[in-house]
Image: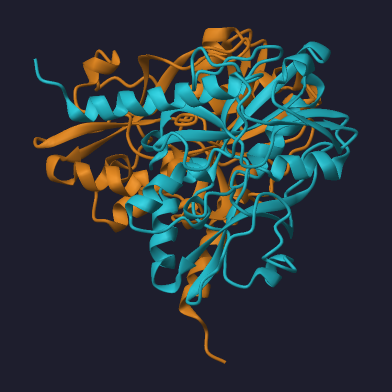
Chain colours: A cyan, B orange
Amino acid sequence: MQANPLKQAQAAAVEAARRARAQYRAGAIQPTAGVAPGMTQANMIALPRDWAWDFLLYAQRNPKPCPVLDVIEAGAHETVLAPGADVRTDIPLYRVWRGGKLAEEVADAKALWAEHPDLVTFLIGCSFTFETPLQEAGIEVRHITQGCNVPMYRTNRQCRPAGRLHGELVVSMRPIPAHRVADAVMVSGRFPAVHGAPVHVGDPALLGIADVTRPDFGDPVRIEPGELPVFWACGVTPQAAVMASGVPFAVTHAPGHMFITDVPDSSYHV
Amino acid sequence: MQANPLKQAQAAAVEAARRARAQYRAGAIQPTAGVAPGMTQANMIALPRDWAWDFLLYAQRNPKPCPVLDVIEAGAHETVLAPGADVRTDIPLYRVWRGGKLAEEVADAKALWAEHPDLVTFLIGCSFTFETPLQEAGIEVRHITQGCNVPMYRTNRQCRPAGRLHGELVVSMRPIPAHRVADAVMVSGRFPAVHGAPVHVGDPALLGIADVTRPDFGDPVRIEPGELPVFWACGVTPQAAVMASGVPFAVTHAPGHMFITDVPDSSYHV
């Protein structure tokens, strides 16, 4: 019986996702851009049950930065997006928030779920998901080329508040050659569940970004002559809400260190 | 100063939406298919606050039938989608559900909000939204031609449960000529926030629909030779969940009698 090359490639991609998660579970720490190409990556935020309604409403009201891919109910830690995975251990790096302030970063979050047994976990779409299609369209993704994390910025745009939650929009940035900007818009726009089309093209100052070479999260990347900075809504936006709203306790992924699922990017293609 | 024809047309469309809502507020009852063309229409379900989390989670887990366009917080009755409108009066016909059973239909729901002052209201995308683009693409929408309500059916497909909520998928049906099925898929697929692409093309029996001439909600429509029945996820799905789950109390729109917003269809175009 002959092997089916497409099925083999799909199985290899799922296997790469599982292998990456197993490495993170064992303690490895790395930004996940470019890891397990073709597999959907997700932002994570876990909040005490008392905050879950406010957050789900905040996400519904701000679907570009906060497209919810799955909600894991209070105290549970397995998602339908990656059966067998554990959100407490399978992300390379976590951030712990206390009183709206970053308290620490940890590689294993089991102790935090033990401290707060009623955490509700939200998995939120990530723009890394459309980076494989961008590259397939011949558009270079600079932070992957440079082998670093994507640059992310707080902006002067406020999200629509919900209950006790408010905060500004956070964006990720990719430099795109002028003649490929439209293609980058079209390719990413096909994926509304993972931030979709950009929210801003060009002048960072109009977003309140004073210095594009100094991102608030992640790493700076080169912008070459003839390129425009292009900005996409970013799943770090919930972390900005945690800070702005003084949320008493939250666990999130560290920016750029995502939860890698078993779901192919193509599942989120419109 | 010269009038701008596009702005005039847009203002006229908003005016048509407002006029229709004013008529319904005054007691007029009619299915809303074809009313205020180009303006987004929405399904409505209002539930006591105690059920709001379960419902928002149900919607998140079943985004094709339940794409949430807005959530109106407990006790309030105005939506950002239509400033000045009142969801208690501006829908042509309401259904009142008690113990999971249809108790009555009313043209004014104010007494129900008085009875349950903590109702949380969900406005959910409606496939009527892409009927204008379908017609602009030269695809006949049969129930509009026939001047009746769209046919809707309960199916054998179960939604993903959430908390106390479970139930089957409800679909709407439009007969489409074989050579336009692909166009109908592409046009509607550009609107994922209002059910998007069809969930089924052809044989109704595969959806558990025994007789396509006898819809569970709305009116039957003719299927001409050379046409296929095409099925879209439907915003009546929450009403099926109310029935299947025995929800103690709910207010919904009557199938096909939608809330007409001030938001142009094009806002939901991907």
Query: Residue B214 or A209: which is nearer the viewer?
Result: A209
Residue A135 position (above or below residue B248) = below
The image quadrant that residue B47 belongs to is top right
Q: Quadrant of the C terminus of chain A?
A: top left
Residue at (51% x, 71% y) in the render: A224
Q: Is residue A189 above or below residue A210?
A: above
Q: Can residue B110 be seen here?
A: no
Residue shown at 52% from the left, 89% from the top:
B2
Q: Position of residue A118 (x, y in %)?
A: 77, 14
How far across and down, in percent of the image, does residue A108 sit? 70, 21
Occupied quadrant, residue A254: top right
Vertical comparison of A55 with B3: above or below: above
The extreme bottom residue here reads B1
Residue B96 falls in which quadrant of the image? top right
Residue B242's x, y, as percent?
57, 15
Q: Is residue B75 above or below residue A129?
A: above
Q: Where, quadrant-wise, is the N terminus of chain A in this rendering?
A: top left
Front residue of this view, candidates B151 and A58: A58
Residue drawn 58% across the image and 13% down it: B165
Query: Image point 79% across, 48% down: which residue?
Result: A167
- Is residue B187 found left or right of A149 in the rendered image? left
